[in-house]
């Protein structure tokens, strides 16, 4: 119903009548165009058909083969296929060839050949082509056929035949089919324009009048006037001559205009100059802020003649005084949030309490405070446990300028109860002092310092305790001198910022404590005093990593026969667990070394130990597990100057010959320990070292650096060893100075050993047959050698030891026996045989005839033992020299 009323209203209006008239005119024009198109189409089709059939008939008639075919004995047989081919190729309805008398010689219908041709032939017999239109009523078809008759001329120009070509007009494409879419589209567009034009006019009229009657328009005006005068935004309008034509109540209040101001000129209103300039400029202004007394007005000015309206302007005024204040607070809150976000990304990047305190001070300065001081308990900086009597040290100071009178770094901060500065020393409450001038309590601690603070212009203070996990680690003091005093919002922000930093400082304290414990444990497990031995002159260095101590270690272990074992290695991992694992592994190496096993066998045993340790660690509640270890185990024999070494994932040693030549042999490197790959993964390689050669053993922390390739570290090491001459201690210092990275991220263990060799005068060796009678001669030879060495006092015990060991070898072995005496720090006696039977110390009863030999040897010798070789075993003893 509502839609019908709208249509009835539209048709009854002037716009509706114009709409109907335009539609009728457009429809008439469309009909005329359609009729003209149909007529023109029929005329074009007839012309096109005439041209096509004439062309086909004349072309076929002018063909020489047609003339020959007509003169042939059987013209129909020759002409029929040619006529059909021409008809199909040209697309006409028929091609008929006749005699001059009109008898058909060729026709699309063979049954008509020989019959009379129907059509006009007179002009063709006179040598002219003729076109005519006939009705087609064959096969029930209603239409018209256009046919052309052309003469076939003989060699002398006489007419010898006729050719007729015809085409049904229905088979020609109609132009109407092509013009219908264009005609329909054009007509539809015309109708649309005729309908839309008046509709837009009517719509605009309805928009201007809101579809209301005059009474309704008057009532609407009253409503708009009431709204205009009650809104909280001032509206003023001026005409083209600068006279005030409209001012609502809010504008009168904001601009302090008189009630009868309408009609007054702009220059007579006595407005603020800046505002008057905007109103008189005639230019668009958006949210221009103008001060009117104590108020801030947002002014929007718009001319009314830009879109064809009357000359003049409209201006709106909005009081933004409170919004500006709220905006400033919102901007301040946004800046605080950004500062907290940046602080979360930057604070605590290093596990160092002092560095974290410095980051906090630098982060807060200039964006929140003008000066910041951070005081931390002494134990926090050292990684210790806090006590009630912990003293405070100045850990960080930062300010917008460098002439602040605050205590210097690491200065001791005195305690004074009852003053704001005591916050963070015994209280977990933050303190806000908005005005230092009005507060006298803070000056009680240090009046002279307070005067200096005041002289720098500092006027506001916030002190926040650094609290983490229920412990007070220190305090943060924020000062302001240039900006507005601190308020409660600033206090909340300072507590949030300090609280986030407190966690990082506590983490740094705990890390420092664990690092100190790990480093202390690591150093306690390393050898403090080098064992006494004459085979090598040794110097060593150990440097823990800056971040956390790892599990690097070294060892010098004296072995039997004046030999010395050198061990360098590192546990994969850091901290207390790595240090403890290193201690267990070092103890295992000492125990295996007492068995006098070759280096590769020592590494195999260590590999099994670490696999067992990892299995045990995997079952522990703490979840700590080893991931392997790297180790180098080497044995140096000063008698033969033979150096045997086996590697488990460890860097190869470097040798410096007595003439300074550097030697870096290619040692077979096995996998790291703890993989459990079996006993065939480690190999022992031997080489001869001349007396006075230097051996450099080191862990990978000396040459590895994440910022460069390991090859550069090795190159620096080789260069330092080649250029440095002097004692092993001097070589160690030079290598560390030249090769050590600036910030080592891993432990460094360095061992430099200089070889010594025992002269032939300090050794004696005899080969004897497995015959008991040879023992007496051996005892005499040994006694004479001892007398030559000035050790005659030990000859009796030595003869007894040699006699017992050789007699035991003769009893249990079948091959030759070799005896060797070595004069070193001990008098060493070694008996070699090809038996693998190991003697055992036992206590014989009173009725036993034997079993007392080893007991006597253990009484006369300081140490004794057995080591196995590829060809048997060696039983050795060590006697203390009296001289």
Image (tube, rainbow, N blue to C red):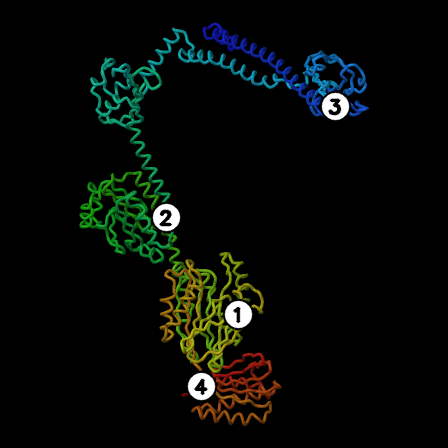
Residue position marked by numbered label 2 in the rendering: 346
Residue position marked by numbered label 3 in the rendering: 67
- Determine which of the numbered discs, if any, sits on residue 568 in the image: none
In front of the other: label 1 or label 4? Answer: 1
Report the Cα–Cα distance between label 4 and label 2: 65 Å
Quarter the C terminus occupies: bottom left
Question: Mark 1 or mark 2, which has the lower sequence index?
Answer: 2
Residue 661 in percent (x, y) is at: 42, 75
Q: Name the element at disc 1.
A: loop
Residue 210 in percent (x, y) is at: 41, 12
Do the CB atoms of the residues marked 4 and 3 lie less than 8 Å apart? no
In front of the other: label 4 or label 2? Answer: 4
Report the Cα–Cα distance between label 3 and label 2: 109 Å
Question: Mark 3 or mark 1, which has the lower sequence index?
Answer: 3
In the picture as drawn, the residue positioned furthest to the front comes out as 156
Do the CB atoms of the residues marked 4 and 2 lie less than 8 Å apart? no
Residue position marked by numbered label 4 in the rendering: 759
Report the Cα–Cα distance between label 1 and label 2: 47 Å
């Amino acid at each position: 119903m509502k839609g019908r009323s709208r249509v009835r209203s539209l048709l009854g209006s002037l716009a509706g009548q114009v709409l109907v008239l335009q539609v009728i005119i457009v429809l008439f024009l469309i009909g005329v165009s359609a009729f003209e198109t149909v007529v023109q189409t029929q005329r074009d089709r007839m012309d096109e058909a005439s041209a096509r059939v004439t062309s086909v008939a004349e072309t076929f008639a002018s063909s020489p083969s047609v003339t020959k075919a007509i003169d042939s004995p059987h013209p129909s047989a020759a002409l029929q296929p040619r006529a059909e081919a021409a008809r199909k190729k040209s697309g006409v309805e028929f091609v008929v060839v006749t005699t001059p008398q009109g008898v058909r010689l060729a026709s699309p219908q063979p049954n008509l050949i020989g019959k009379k041709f129907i059509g006009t032939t007179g002009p063709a017999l006179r040598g002219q082509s003729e076109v005519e239109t006939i009705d087609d009523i064959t096969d029930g078809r209603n239409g018209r056929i256009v046919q052309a008759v052309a003469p076939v001329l003989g060699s002398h120009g006489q007419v010898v035949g006729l050719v007729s070509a015809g085409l049904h007009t229905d088979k020609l494409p109609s132009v109407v089919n092509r013009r219908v879419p264009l005609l329909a589209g054009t007509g539809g567009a015309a109708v649309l324009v005729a309908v839309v034009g008046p509709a837009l006019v009517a719509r605009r009229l309805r928009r201007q009048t809101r579809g209301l009657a005059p009474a309704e328009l008057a009532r609407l005006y009253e409503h708009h006037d009431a709204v205009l005068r009650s809104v909280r935004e001032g509206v003023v309008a001026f005409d083209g001559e600068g006279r005030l034509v409209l001012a609502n109540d809010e504008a009168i209040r904001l601009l302090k205009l008189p009630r009868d101001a309408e009609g007054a000129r702009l220059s007579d209103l006595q407005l603020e100059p800046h505002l008057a300039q905007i109103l008189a400029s005639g230019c668009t202004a958006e949210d221009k802020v103008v001060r009117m007394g104590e108020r801030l007005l947002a002014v929007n000015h718009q001319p009314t003649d830009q879109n064809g309206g009357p000359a003049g302007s409209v201006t709106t005024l909005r009081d933004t005084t409170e919004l500006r204040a709220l905006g400033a607070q919102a901007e301040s809150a946004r800046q605080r949030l950004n500062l907290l976000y940046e602080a979360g990304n930057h604070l605590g990047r290093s596990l160092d309490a002092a560095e974290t305190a410095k980051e906090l001070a630098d982060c807060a300065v200039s964006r929140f405070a003008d000066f910041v001081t951070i005081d931390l308990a002494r134990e926090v900086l050292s990684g210790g446990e806090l006590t009630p009597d912990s003293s405070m040290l100045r850990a960080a100071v930062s300010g917008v300028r460098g002439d602040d009178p605050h205590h210097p770094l690491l200065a001791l901060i005195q305690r004074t109860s009852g003053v704001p500065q005591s916050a963070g020393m015994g209280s977990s409450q933050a303190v806000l002092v908005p005005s230092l001038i009005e507060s006298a309590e803070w000056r009680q601690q240090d009046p002279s310092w307070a005067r200096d603070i005041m002289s720098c212009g500092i006027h506001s203070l916030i002190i926040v305790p650094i609290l983490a996990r229920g412990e007070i680690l220190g305090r943060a003091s924020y000062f302001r001198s240039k900006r507005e005093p601190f308020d409660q919002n600033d206090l909340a922000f300072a507590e949030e910022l300090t609280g986030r930093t407190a966690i990082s400082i506590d983490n740094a304290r705990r890390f420092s404590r664990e690092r100190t414990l790990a480093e202390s444990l690591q150093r306690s497990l390393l050898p403090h005093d080098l064992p006494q031995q004459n085979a090598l002159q040794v110097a060593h260095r150990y440097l823990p990593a800056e971040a956390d101590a790892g599990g690097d270690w070294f060892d010098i272990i004296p072995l039997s026969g004046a030999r010395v074992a050198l061990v360098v290695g590192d546990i994969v991992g850091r901290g207390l667990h790595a240090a403890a694992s290193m201690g267990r592994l070092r103890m295992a190496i000492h125990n295996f070394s007492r068995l006098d096993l070759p280096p590769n066998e020592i590494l195999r045993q260590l590999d099994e130990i670490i696999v067992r340790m990892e299995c045990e660690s995997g079952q522990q509640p703490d979840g700590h597990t080893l991931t392997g270890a790297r180790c180098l185990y080497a044995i140096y024999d000063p008698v033969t100057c033979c150096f045997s070494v086996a590697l488990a994932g460890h860097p190869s040693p470097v040798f410096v010959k007595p003439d300074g030549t550097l030697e870096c042999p290619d040692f077979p490197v096995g996998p790291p320990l703890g993989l459990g790959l079996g006993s065939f993964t480690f190999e022992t390689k031997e080489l001869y070292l001349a007396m006075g050669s230097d051996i450099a053993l080191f862990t990978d922390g000396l040459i590895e650096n994440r910022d460069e390739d390991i090859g550069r570290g090795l190159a620096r090491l080789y260069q330092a060893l080649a250029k440095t001459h002097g004692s092993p201690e001097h070589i160690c210092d030079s290598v560390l100075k030249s090769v050590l990275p600036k910030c080592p991220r891993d432990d460094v263990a360095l061992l430099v050993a200089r070889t010594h060799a025992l002269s032939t005068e300090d050794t004696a060796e005899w080969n004897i047959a497995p015959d008991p009678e040879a023992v007496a001669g051996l005892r005499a030879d040994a006694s004479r050698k001892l007398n030559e060495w000035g050790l005659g006092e030990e000859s009796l015990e030595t003869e007894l030891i040699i006699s017992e060991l050789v007699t035991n070898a003769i009893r249990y072995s079948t091959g030759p026996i070799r005896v060797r005496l070595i004069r070193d720090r001990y008098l060493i006696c070694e008996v070699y045989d090809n038996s693998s039977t190991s003697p055992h110390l036992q206590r014989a009863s009173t009725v036993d005839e034997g079993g007392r030999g080893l007991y006597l040897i253990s009484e006369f010798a300081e140490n004794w033992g057995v080591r196995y070789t590829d060809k048997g075993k060696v039983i050795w003893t060590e006697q203390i020299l009296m001289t």
